[in-house]
Amino acid sequence: DAGVTQSPTHLIKTRGQQVTLRCSPKSGHDTVSWYQQALGQGPQFIFQYYEEEERQRGNFPDRFSGHQFPNYSSELNVNALLLGDSALYLCASSRRGLRETQYFGPGTRLLVL
Amino acid sequence: QKEVEQNSGPLSVPEGAIASLNCTYSDRGSQSFFWYRQYSGKSPELIMFIYSNGDKEDGRFTAQLNKASQYVSLLIRDSQPSDSATYLCAVPRGTGGFKTIFGAGTRLFVKA
């Protein structure tokens, strides 16, 4: 049973650039949520996708956008990168109706220089 | 007041002891509560979830929920050095989709 996968594992960008991160959910899951985790903090909710639509959004600017594909995989896009965007980006998948039980992928570590 | 609060620690316990981790939440309407373990440099791993008041046991782990007092706790019995990690309390919110609010985590250190 394949778990949640994310790519790439690490990424280095410079300020002002754009980045796309990818996530494939656990088999049988249809909902994908994205989180940003800065060092020493808990994960911060960015947004959630279900049925290819954004269903919930946290307090993140419009520079953060996403997409969900018909096969339930998802992308997170961040435009105009800032130094403060350096963090671990986590994708979590869940199955609708199963009490919001989420499983996390390994994460993508983004460094903005 | 933060939506989900945890003591950041570090909490240090000797091997074989019981580690007690606490979490309080602000939304009285919350229905589900999760505990994740996160090793340094790794992603969070789900270890327990609880929906009803009272205790839920799974191996060496026991989750306790008190909705009236708005707290949820995690007990780790017979603590092992391999339990040394950050423990995150998570509480989903919303309808028609949900967002999960995480506490900042409690760092646990189990001394051999």
Image (tube, rainbow, N blue to C red):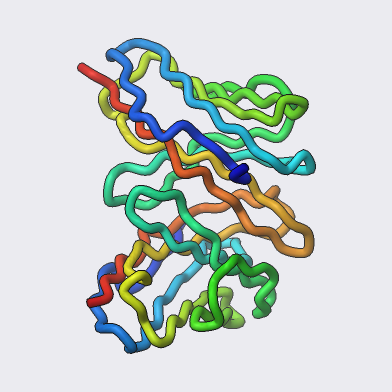
Location of residue B23 by image quarter: top right
Question: Which one is in front, A66 or A31?
Answer: A66
Question: Which one is in front, B67 or A24?
Answer: B67
Q: Residue at the spot x=30%, y=30% of the render?
A: B84
Residue A62 shows in the view: yes
Tell me: A60 left or right of A11: right
The percent position of residue B37, horizontal first and vertical second, equals: 42, 39
The percent position of residue A41, horizontal first and vertical second, equals: 41, 50
Tell me: A37 left or right of B40: right
Tell me: B40 left or right of A52: left
Location of residue A85 by image quarter: bottom left
Q: How many marks?
A: 0
Q: Residue at the spot x=42%, y=13% of the render?
A: B18
The percent position of residue B101, horizontal first and vertical second, equals: 59, 51
**Among all residues in the image, which is located at the extreme front?**
B1
Quadrant of the frame with the N terminus of chain B: top right
Where B93 sits versus B74, above or below? Answer: below
Residue B59 shows in the view: no
Where A69 sits versus B38, above or below? Answer: below
Location of residue A72 by image quarter: bottom right
Q: Residue at the spot x=37%, y=43% of the render?
A: B38
Quadrant of the frame with the C terminus of chain B: top left
Q: Residue at the spot x=77%, y=39% of the render?
A: B28
Question: Which one is in front, B66 or B2?
Answer: B2
Where A57 sits versus B82, above or below? Answer: below
The percent position of residue A111, horizontal first and vertical second, equals: 26, 71
Tell me: B25 left or right of A104: right
